[in-house]
Image (cartoon, coloured by chain):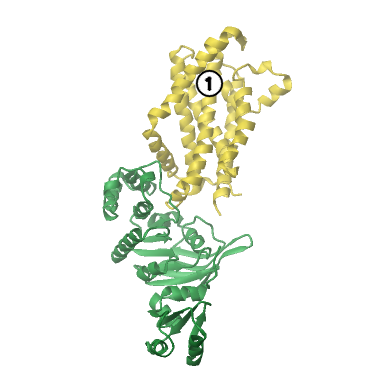
Amino acid sequence: MNILQVEALRKSYGELQAVKGISFAVRKGECFGLLGPNGAGKTTTIRMLYGYTPRDAGRLELFGLDIDRDIREIKRRIGICQQEDSLDPDLTVHDNLVGYARYFSIPRQQAERRAGELLDFFALKSRAADRISVLSGGLKRRLMLARALVNDPDLLILDEPTTGLDPQSRQLLWEKLSALKGRGLSILLTTHYMEEAERLCDRLVIVDHGEILVEGKPTLLVRERVGHSVLEVADPDQAVRDFLAREQCRVEDLGNRLLVYLDDGDQLFLKLTREVRTEGCTLRPAGLEDLFLKLTGRELRE
Amino acid sequence: MNWPRPSQISYRTLRVWQRNFSVYRRTWKISFLPPLLEPLLYILAFGVGLAVMVGELQYAGRPLSYTVFIAPALVSVAIMYNAFFETTYNSFVRMYWQKTYDALLATPLNLEEIILGEMLWAATKSVIAATLMGSVISLCGLFEYPGALLLIPIAALGGLLFAAFGMICTALVPGIEMFNLPIFLGVTPMFLFSGTFFPLENLPGWAQSLAQLLPLTHLVALVRGSALEFWSGSLWLSLLYLLAVTAILLPLAIALMVRRIVR
């Protein structure tokens, strides 16, 4: 069964078409990724899912319920971790959780129990009495995530959960998300960190300019669209270029760097390093980032 | 612009009120000080300093000491200030910097409930302030009972009105520094020209008519009439005026906030 069904979703802001007819579905128990560069329409899409932003057209169903008819019931069953910190600075860590539970009409006792569990799970117990202003970025994110789980949601929606975090906090958050996934929680995640998507997402879409470019399992997509591995040559000279032209392979020329997409083995790499030159040549497995950049281009956004 | 529908409002509105109340409770000792001390300062300044020069004045055909005359006005101004400053600066901070509304919108609450809850809270602050101030003033023996008990429902109505007025400003200002404009053009003139510190009859005729449009004029009339037990038929008109203005401003404030936030 699909937890979330999005069909032909559209949203415009005046002339700007932020979302141009996006369709996808999230299945029960999977982690689904919404990937795209800044301004691709990810956050707009997410916001339409919980009625924050009214959509111009399209159908939205969560848990088999229509968003126009059952928005309250839908909102009761989803947990949303917004991109920007929206913790209540007037309350303590603990009260942020218990206070938030009140909006879901969760009885006090149950809210206290849930808050205790979540503080434990996210290693926040020792900070329970602290004010929000003294928390680091990583702790705030953990608390944001904990707060999104206070109503024990059937779908967790995360909008760029690790943007701006240090590697330690990011690793911890990924660990926690993996654990939640392991317990069968359905997750919808937006990100522009490919490592994050590779690690967490069972399936994903890459969006840009409000449209879906590809959809599928990350490893399969990379294999199909990019290849098996990537040969990088730094500061290529004419000899290297001539060699690659003779070999008739897929080369992307970035000026001072060449990317060669390879479908099989390391023959070409070995031949290049043996016959032409060794320094500056590296062979690495193809990844989601290669696919992402291939589809969305390399120019800067915003 | 979409006007709010009654069906959009549920008991969840009270959750917003509850949130603000919990925060208020943490700092109530400090929040209680201004309404307790302010009337004492005013009464000291006006009652001791200015009243000597003003002496007695005639109000509604009865002689009245200046201190007794301004005491109800102090409560009225507090009702206005508490609600107005809550839904302007405080609500703006919650909306814009603290992202409190964003957080609440991710729960079963809707925006209409959030805005209404904010205004109910602001009106509650007016009631708290009026009660505290009224108690201090009563201890000085300046108010009549049981008439002064009416201050509580009057503060609730006046509080709602000025909460809605403040919320409309919040919905319209581009940035927080722009609140100076409605304060300079609206709140301060009301503070001075609503029969607060001198009877309206002292003004030229045209200014009296203008003053009759100011909501604070009618709030002052009601508070003074009740607290000093100066009963007259015109109080019903003042009540009607406040009810009518509130009935317009309250849904307007919600509609304008929805227009501002939803995109």
Callout 1: SS:
helix
Q: Nearer the viewer, residue B94 or B238?
A: B94
| Residue underneath mark 1 | B74
Q: Residues within 10 Å of mark 1 (few under 14, many from 20)?
A: many
Q: Nearer the viewer, residue B94 or B122?
A: B94
Query: Could you say where residue B107 lies in the image, as x and y percent from the top left?
Result: 42, 51
- In this rendering, the answer to whether A269 lies above or below B231 is below
Q: Locate the N terminus of chain A by quadrant.
A: bottom left
Q: Judge left or right: residue A93 versus residue A246.
A: left
Q: Nearer the viewer, residue A129 or B128?
A: A129
Query: Could you say where residue B214 lies in the image, as x and y percent from the top left?
Result: 63, 28
Q: Judge left or right: residue A163 versus residue B216.
A: left
Task: Give amino acid for label 1.
Answer: Leu
Q: Locate the C terminus of chain A by quadrant.
A: bottom right
Quadrant position of residue B238: top right
Tell which chain the image draws in yellow. B
Query: Could you say where residue A288 lies in the image, as x and y percent from the top left?
Result: 42, 74
Colour chain A is painted in: green
Q: Residue furthest bottom?
A: A246
Which chain hosts label 1? B
Query: Could you say where residue B204 lies in the image, as x and y percent from the top left?
Result: 72, 19
Residue A94 seen from this side: yes
- In this rendering, the answer to whether A266 lies above or below A286 is below
Q: Judge left or right: residue A69 versus residue A264.
A: right
- Residue at image coords 30%, 49%: A115
